[in-house]
Image (cartoon, rainbow, N blue to C red):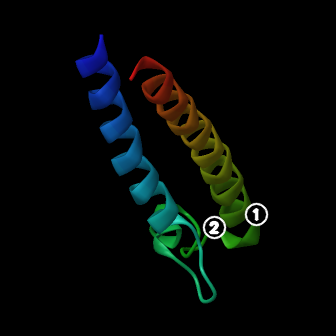
């Protein structure tokens, strides 16, 4: 159980790093590669950013949950 929780925690941490890097910064970001920078216009970019925000929040909450479970388990 502990090993599975640690592996899940590590995967979530790597996933969060990737998700944060995909977010748009001051002058655009890697999220432009997935529909934000092409001919899709402003609306396509907003949808991509909104979905990316949701996925990042869910992954962050899962990371916090596994962190709390690891603290309680140990």
At numbered mark 2, what does the secondary structure look like: helix, strand or loop?
loop
Residue 14 percent location from the top left of the image = 34, 49
**1 and 2 marks in contact (CB < 8 Å):** yes
Q: Mark 1 highlights which residue?
A: 43
Residue 56 percent location from the top left of the image = 58, 48
Front residue of 1/72: it is 72
**Is residue 51 found left or right of 70 in the rendered image?**
right
Where 41 falls versus 47 (above or below)?
Answer: below
Residue 5 percent location from the top left of the image = 34, 22
Q: How crowded is mark 1: few (under 14 residues within 10 Å), some or many (20 or more)?
A: few
Front residue of 19/41: it is 19
What residue is drawn where x is 55% and y is 76%?
37
Q: Mark 2 highlights which residue?
A: 40
**Going by the picture, which residue comes out furthest to the front?**
74
Where 1 falls versus 7 (above or below)?
Answer: above
Front residue of 53/39: it is 53
Q: How crowded is mark 2: few (under 14 residues within 10 Å), some or many (20 or more)?
A: few
Where 30 falls versus 66 (above or below)?
Answer: below
At numbered mark 1, what does the secondary structure look like: helix, strand or loop?
helix
**Is residue 62 found left or right of 26 in the rendered image?**
left
The quarter of the picture where residue 12 lies is top left
């Amino acid at each position: 159980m502990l090993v599975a929780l640690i592996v899940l925690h590590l995967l979530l941490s790597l996933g969060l790093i990737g998700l944060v890097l995909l977010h748009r910064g001051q002058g655009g970001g890697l999220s432009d590669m997935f529909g934000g920078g092409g001919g899709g216009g402003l609306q396509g970019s907003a949808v991509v950013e909104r979905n990316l925000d949701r996925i990042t929040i869910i992954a962050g909450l899962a990371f916090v949950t596994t962190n709390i479970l690891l603290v309680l388990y140990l």
